[in-house]
Image (tube, rainbow, N blue to C red):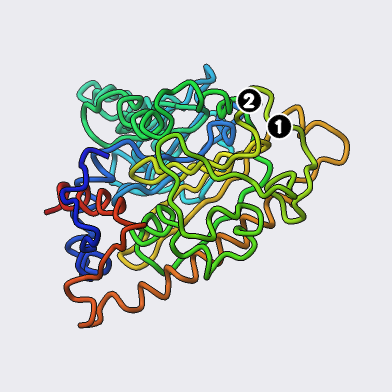
């Protein structure tokens, strides 16, 4: 985040209600946030071999992310350069060495170059080099694919490492979790009838945890008071709890890179605009937010584990998945409750952040700085 809380007053105002439903504001967010910043687009491991692809919608662009013949990842706008037809219509799949438009059979290599155009390719007046797929900037960070629609974006590290360093004081404690080498044990996709910012705001505070999350507060009792853990501070597991699982029992060893002082702790980090990081000592949970409409957001939740633990006989991620899935669904429900009231005249000028929530005003200031 690039802004700070502007007032020392204990109670700060939220954004007005229209910021959560107005199509014009949503349009500006797509243009000035999601089309100008690096946006998380999932794990690189999801595309394991050449020709593996997935499609991602960012702003109003559909993007093909594909592993090329040399094993690298590339991204292109999902648009045929002939007459604009959508090329890949599935969410993911395996290509047979090329990308072909089903409309007129224009064909592109996995590197985006035009390699086939019936009755046109050999025309002396046609320069195939001008009609390759439109590239999209792609970088990987900690095993995640990041895309940027801007013409000349700064390196992704300039955007994503800042909130990590702000959370820990340096990058080193975060690096011990080894996100790049972890692997996905379970993925759940949620469709939430709420604005993406309501989901971020909810994640940023635990004022609601006591009323809404009994399972979470049993495992992490510090959240029961509504305390917000910031800087290097961490929520600790209860004394009688071994791990963040539905039973409270440990079924996996700690992640191999962690130090003794990292164990039995939970850290949450927001990496704008669309990644939520949850660090636990035997797994990591990542939420990727993909706005669909002003009042609808898709959230892809991935549970990451050490591949050594995953290779053990009887490995089962569900004790970790079940508890966070419960917490997720509780959160989505309250976000949808809030969304229902954003058009009310009672919320026309917004609400307030109480002292335990005042840090959320940084997010509101970020939005205002981007869209006005």
**Which quadrant of the structure image shows residue 336?**
bottom left
Residue 209 percent coordinates (x, y): 51, 62
The residue lying at 44 percent from left, 54 percent from top is 203
The residue lying at 18 percent from left, 76 percent from top is 348
C-alpha gap between disc 2 and disc 1: 7 Å
**Which quadrant of the structure image shows residue 253?**
top right
Task: Name the residue furthest top.
Answer: 70
Seen in the image, is 89 located left or right of residue 163? right
Mark 2 Cα shell of 10 Å, populated few (<14), some (14-19), many (≥20): some
Q: Residue 254 carries which label?
A: 1
Local SS, label 2: loop
Number of numbered labels in the structure image: 2
**Disc 2, disc 1: CB below 8 Å?**
yes
Residue 301 percent coordinates (x, y): 55, 50
Give above or below for 207 relative to 177: below
Task: Name the residue furthest left.
Answer: 372
Q: Which quarter of the rendering shows the C terminus?
A: bottom left
Residue 147 percent coordinates (x, y): 36, 35
Residue closest to the eye, 58 or 371 = 371
Q: Which mark is residue 8?
A: none
Task: Name the residue furthest bottom.
Answer: 345
Residue linked to disc 2: 258
The residue lying at 61 percent from left, 65 percent from top is 214
The residue lying at 45 percent from left, 38 percent from top is 100
**Which quadrant of the structure image shows residue 229?**
top left
Residue closest to the eye, 300 or 333 = 333
Residue 316 percent coordinates (x, y): 79, 45
Mark 1 Cα shell of 10 Å, populated few (<14), some (14-19), many (≥20): many
């Amino acid at each position: 985040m690039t802004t700070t809380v502007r007032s020392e007053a204990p109670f700060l105002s939220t954004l007005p209600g229209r910021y959560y439903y107005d199509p014009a504001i949503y349009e500006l967010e797509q243009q000035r946030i999601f089309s100008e910043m690096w946006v998380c687009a999932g794990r690189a491991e999801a595309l394991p071999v050449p020709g593996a692809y997935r499609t991602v919608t960012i702003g109003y662009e559909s993007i093909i992310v594909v592993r090329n013949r040399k094993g690298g990842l590339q991204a292109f706008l999902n648009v045929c350069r002939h007459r604009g037809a959508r090329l890949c219509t599935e969410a993911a799949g395996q290509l047979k060495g090329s990308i072909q438009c089903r409309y007129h059979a224009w064909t592109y290599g996995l590197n985006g170059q035009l390699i086939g155009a019936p009755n046109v390719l050999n025309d002396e007046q046609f320069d195939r080099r001008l009609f390759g797929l439109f590239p999209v900037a792609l970088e990987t960070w900690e095993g995640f694919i990041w895309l940027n629609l801007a013409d000349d974006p700064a390196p992704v590290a300039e955007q994503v490492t800042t909130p990590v360093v702000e959370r820990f004081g340096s990058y080193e404690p975060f690096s011990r979790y080894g996100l790049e080498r972890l692997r996905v044990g379970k993925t759940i996709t949620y469709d939430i009838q709420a604005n993406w910012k309501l989901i971020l705001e909810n994640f940023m505070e635990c004022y609601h945890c006591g009323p809404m999350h009994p399972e979470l507060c049993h495992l992490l009792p510090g959240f029961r008071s509504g305390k917000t853990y910031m800087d290097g501070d961490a929520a600790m597991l209860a004394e009688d709890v071994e791990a963040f699982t539905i039973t409270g029992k440990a079924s996996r060893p700690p992640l191999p890179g962690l130090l003794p002082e990292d164990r039995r702790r939970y850290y949450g980090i927001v990496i704008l605009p669309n990644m939520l990081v949850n660090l636990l000592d035997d797994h990591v949970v990542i939420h990727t937010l993909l706005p669909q409409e002003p009042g609808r957001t898709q959230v892809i939740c991935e549970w990451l584990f050490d591949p050594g633990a995953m290779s053990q006989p009887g490995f089962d991620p569900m004790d970790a998945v079940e508890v966070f899935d419960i917490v997720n669904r509780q959160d989505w429900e309250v976000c949808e409750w809030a969304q229902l009231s954003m058009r009310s005249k009672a919320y026309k000028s917004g609400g307030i952040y109480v002292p335990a929530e005042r840090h959320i005003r940084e997010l509101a200031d970020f939005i205002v700085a981007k869209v006005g």
